[in-house]
Image (cartoon, rainbow, N blue to C red):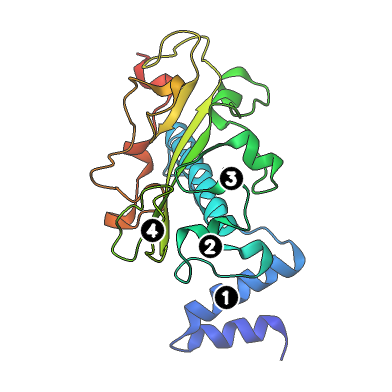
Amino acid sequence: MNLKNKLLTSLASKKGNALLLATAGAIAATFSVYFFVSLTTLSDDSKQRVAHLYNAYQMGQSLKAKIDGADVNQARLGNNIEKDIEAPIDELFHNGSYITLQEMIKKAVIIAADDPTATARSGTDVGYDLDNSGVLIKYADSSGNVITPDSNSTAVVADVHLFVNLAGAPDADSNSPYVDGAPFYYILMDDSQVATTGLTKTVDLVQFPQGILSTVDGGPQAEVSVVLPQDDEV
């Protein structure tokens, strides 16, 4: 049976939609095929917010995978205490550390993407601020409680709470809510860094205390978690 007939047959079954999606995914992965995605209901600003939140989420996902040991086919989280998780990895990934996007790239944790807002506003490809973008790492136990760094805790580290700052270059036309010449933080979850002291978090950490990867209420949402320089433009 050829591929077309297989797809038609799958649609007639109760599991047709799921199978069709799985088949489409397999085709895309195998042949680098690109499928249509409807974005017509989203404004340009909404698309930018979604892109920024997705990039921040990927920073968190990539960092969690590194700490968990995915790059060496291990599963450290849920099986080890703090000192045993930290022993084989760089100090940049230790509990309580803040790792910049620049350092993440150098450690081959993630590949940088262009800043969609700065690129759209300038008309040329512009990257994120690699030094002011970064992630604060907190280890947590099975109850979701944060483990104090260097506490010699015997609690098993079940998860990591990751708080992302995603910054772009200062916007030449409208850098509010930040002062002129300062990095523009599309997403700000950690205000403990020198550059972020006194700034307002863009994500409600009372609602999402587990950070960027939180699944509470569906996790952080783009429209209320991401600020853009054009927000204050009339």
Q: Residues within 10 Å of mark 1 (few under 14, many from 20)?
A: few
Q: Residue furthest right?
A: 31
Q: Amino acid at mark 3?
A: Glu
Name the residue carrying label 1. Answer: 22
Local SS, label 4: loop
- State the separation of the CA atoms marked 3 and 1: 39 Å
Instruction: Work out which quarter of the rendered image holds the C terminus and state it.
Output: top left
The residue depicted at 64 percent of the width and 47 percent of the height is 110
Up-down relation of residue 195 to residue 35 (above or below): above
Q: Closer to the observer: label 4 or label 1?
A: 4
Q: Earlier in the sequence, mark 3 or mark 1?
A: 1
Task: Let me know if residue 113 appears in the view.
Answer: no
Q: Residue furthest left?
A: 206
Q: Quadrant of residue 20?
A: bottom right
Q: Closer to the observer: label 3 or label 1?
A: 3
Local SS, label 2: helix
Q: Earlier in the sequence, mark 2 or mark 1?
A: 1
Q: Amino acid at mark 1?
A: Ala
The residue depicted at 61 percent of the width and 64 percent of the height is 70
- State the separation of the CA atoms marked 2 and 3: 13 Å
Up-down relation of residue 37 to residue 72 (above or below): above
Name the residue carrying label 3. Answer: 91
Q: Amino acid at mark 4?
A: Ser
Name the residue carrying label 4. Answer: 153
Query: In the shown orientation, is residue 104 left or right of residue 16?
Result: right
Local SS, label 1: helix
Q: Earlier in the sequence, mark 4 or mark 1?
A: 1
In this orientation, which residue lies closer to the viewer: 74 or 105? 74
In this orientation, which residue lies closer to the viewer: 112 or 12? 112
Name the residue carrying label 2. Answer: 84
Q: Residues within 10 Å of mark 4 (few under 14, many from 20)?
A: some
